[in-house]
């Protein structure tokens, strides 16, 4: 899998394993924004990425905490901006130092940060096809509004 891929997943298990394969392409300082509607599988994909960093904890959606930090091969930050209402709140939360550090950051609802995410941010766009199938598009392009 390279960083410009258009994939189809047939099941949650397959989404998780695609996340794991994608995770193997990531390294220190990488930021991934996963976008897509409620329940499409963003957290499942993030769990697959966490698998590739040997994180044993159960990775759950940090919707209420905004961020969960895990330690594996690298620091692993799992963020969820669902409850963020405006990019200015992102500045206030001051995550930038963390994003530029040695860890890997995975952000659900990253588009809510507007232009605040680094230009190097990778985007994973998830869409429903039907009950169990999802389209997953991975692109190099930085997050846009
Ligand atoms: N192909 C698939 N890929 C991922 N999840 C799937 C798939 N088919 C069914 N599912 C189910 O869809 C649900 C996805 O839930 P998940 O919490 O990952 O969504 P989410 O996008 O993170 O939602 P939220 O926006 O609330 O954070 C799970 O219950 C999962 O089992
Ligand atoms: Mg989620």
Image: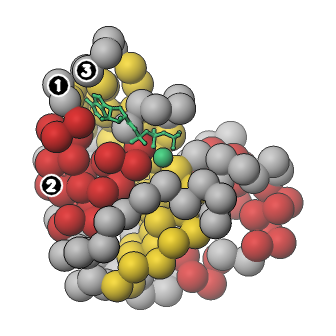
Marks 1 and 2, the one that precedes in the sequence? 1
- Whether disc 3's CB lies below 8 Å from ligand 1 is answered yes
- The residue at which mark 3 appears reads as 133
Identify the residue shown where x is 58% and y is 46%. Answer: 109
Q: Quadrant of the C terminus?
A: top right
Q: Whole-Å distance between the Cαs marked 1 and 2?
A: 16 Å
In the drawing, does residue 122 fall left or right of residue 7? right
Label 3: few (<14), some or many (≥20) within 10 Å? some
Q: Is residue 7 visible?
A: yes
Name above or below for residue 77 compared with residue 64.
below
Q: Dot 3 lies on which element? A: loop
Q: Position of residue 104 (x, y in %)?
A: 39, 74
Marks 3 and 1, the one that precedes in the sequence? 1
Quarter of image, res 93: bottom right
- The residue at which mark 1 appears reads as 10
Identify the residue shown where x is 34% and y is 85%. Answer: 71
Q: Dot 1 lies on which element? A: loop
Residue 138 - label: none
Name above or below for residue 34 compared with residue 68.
above
Identify the residue shown where x is 20% and y is 65%. Answer: 51
- Whether disc 1's CB lies below 8 Å from ligand 1 is answered yes
Label 1: few (<14), some or many (≥20) within 10 Å? some
Marks 1 and 2: CB-CB under 8 Å? no
Q: Nearer the viewer, mark 1 or mark 2?
A: 1
């Amino acid at each position: 899998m390279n960083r410009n891929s258009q994939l189809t997943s047939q099941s949650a298990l397959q989404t998780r394993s695609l996340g794991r394969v994608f995770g193997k392409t990531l390294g220190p300082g990488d930021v991934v924004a996963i976008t897509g509607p409620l329940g499409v599988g963003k957290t499942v994909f993030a769990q697959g990425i966490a698998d590739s960093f040997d994180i044993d904890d159960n990775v759950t959606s940090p919707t209420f905490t905004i961020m969960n930090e895990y330690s594996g091969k690298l620091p692993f930050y799992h963020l969820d901006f669902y409850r963020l209402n405006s990019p200015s709140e992102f500045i206030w939360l001051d995550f930038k130092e963390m994003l530029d550090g040695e860890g890997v950051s995975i952000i659900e609802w990253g588009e809510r940060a507007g232009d605040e995410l680094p230009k190097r941010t990778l985007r994973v766009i998830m869409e429903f096809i039907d009950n169990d199938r999802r389209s997953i598009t991975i692109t190099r392009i930085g997050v846009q509004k």
